[in-house]
Amino acid sequence: MSELSTESITEAVLQRLAGTPDPRLKFISEALVRHLHAFIEEVRPSFGEWEAAIDFLTSVGQMCTRERQEFILLSDTLGASMLVDAINAPRDPRATESTVLGPFYLDDPPQFENGAIIDGGREGVPLLIEGEVLDSEGNRRGGAIVDVWQSDAEGAYDVQNPESTTYLRGRFTCDGAGRFSLWSIVPSSYAIPNDGPVGKMLAAQARHPFRPAHVHFRITSPGCSSLTTHIFVKGDEYLDSDAVFGVKESLIEDLPLHEPNEAPIGRLLDRPFSWLRRTFVLAPVPHQA
Ligand code: BEZ
Ligand code: FE
């Protein structure tokens, strides 16, 4: 039996992986070992530091529940989620850019008719959202399904309060011309959940936990790639320092105030409202190699 040195340990582990039957798993495992060993060589952790690293990952796992996914927050705050997004984003420059899904998506939201009010009685500046969904050839995607979710004016999502009912989220079906519409309220910037190990990490790195105000959209239509994106509110103080690196210039929109009497028929308002009108373009489904 030969002694293993810092030079030969990497090779020894790689050799042990050589028989991995699934080629993709073999490739991923080998890359993980090479990069992990190179990281350890660079950092040269003490025993105490290595134990602290294992304790940190353990506490990230222990924080996870059905409602709280601390590993996603870790991936988001280290920029890993946006890197995966960039690698997988459709290459079509005509398509609307994507950004992170985040932990507050529900795959069975309440369904609404177009024009519905989804504020659930939350206070805030009324926001009329009128969208149209096209494919990258400019065809209108009638029947496209649009999921919308956002924080309230205090920066909280419905799912963060187990006692609250669902609000500020819903599923809409586009009309024959690919249009959808709804009334919500102007969202606010908010701190990502920071009462766990990821919050401690951010504090230790002297980073704030805030995301700029945004509305989330997830849009699907047969024959098109699905789109997961946000629209950010122009002028937000955190646009340049989003805790999860999700901001893209093309996704920032101005939401100027309009007088109540400019509201379309169907809503009587006694105060000014904001109006978001936006076209979303879906890329084609990628060809399988
Ligand atoms: C969100 O936008 O909902 C979000 C994204 C990443 C981490 C936390 C929240
Ligand atoms: Fe969000």
Image (cartoon, rainbow, N blue to C red):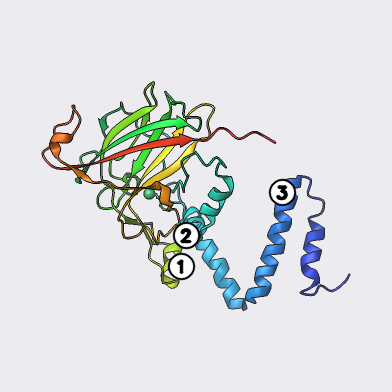
Identity of the residue furthest to the top in this view: 176
- Relative image position of residue 268 (x, y in whole percent): 14, 32
Residue 166 showing in the rendered view: no
Under tag 1, what secondary structure?
helix
Nearer mark to the viewer, of 2 and 3: 2
Side of 256 where 68 appears, left or right: right
The local crowd at label 2, few if under 14, some if 14 to 19, many if 20 or more residues have their Cα within 10 Å, is many
Under tag 2, what secondary structure?
helix
Say if disc 1 is inside 8 Å of ligand 1: no
Q: Which residue is mark 3?
A: 25
Q: Is residue 46 above or below residue 196?
A: below
Q: Which residue is mark 2?
A: 77
Under tag 3, what secondary structure?
helix
Residue at position x 78%, y 69% in the image: 9
Q: Which residue is mark 1?
A: 201
Which comes sooner in the sequence, label 1 or label 2? Answer: 2
Residue type for callout 1: Met
Determine the CA span between mark 2 and mark 3: 26 Å
> Which is nearer the eye, 40 or 177?
177
Residue type for callout 2: Thr
Residue type for callout 3: Leu
